[in-house]
Image: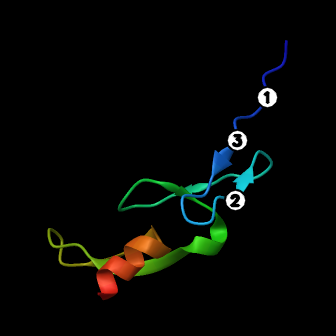
Amino acid sequence: MTEDPSAWMCHICNYRSTSEEGIACSRCYKISCRQHFRTVPLLNPESGLYEFVRICALCELKDIS
């Protein structure tokens, strides 16, 4: 018996795939497709250094507003 890969769905555009991997947002931890992700520098308050994190488009909009 072979196991079929589980499908994932982008929480923004509802894109589904079993052939590629979704990416989890560093803020909300929801899965999104590559089109709805950005890698942005965010300040780590503990170390005082900027770190590159992947966040989805919705979390990025929350930061702007």
Local SS, label 2: loop
**As drawn, is 6 to the left or to the right of 38?**
right
- In the picture of the structure, the residue carrying the numbered disc 3 is 7
Give the labeled residue for mark 1: 4
State the quadrant of the N terminus.
top right
Amino acid carrying label 3: it is Ala
Q: Nearer the viewer, residue 39 or 48?
A: 39
| Residue at disc 3, secondary structure | loop
Left or right of residue 46: residue 43: right
Q: Earlier in the sequence, mark 2 or mark 1?
A: 1
Asked if residue 52 can be seen in this view, the reply is no
Q: How many marks?
A: 3
Measured Cα–Cα span from mark 2 to mark 3: 10 Å
Residue 23 pos. (x, y %)? 57, 57
Which label sits in the foreground, 2 or 1? 2
The residue tagged 2 is 15
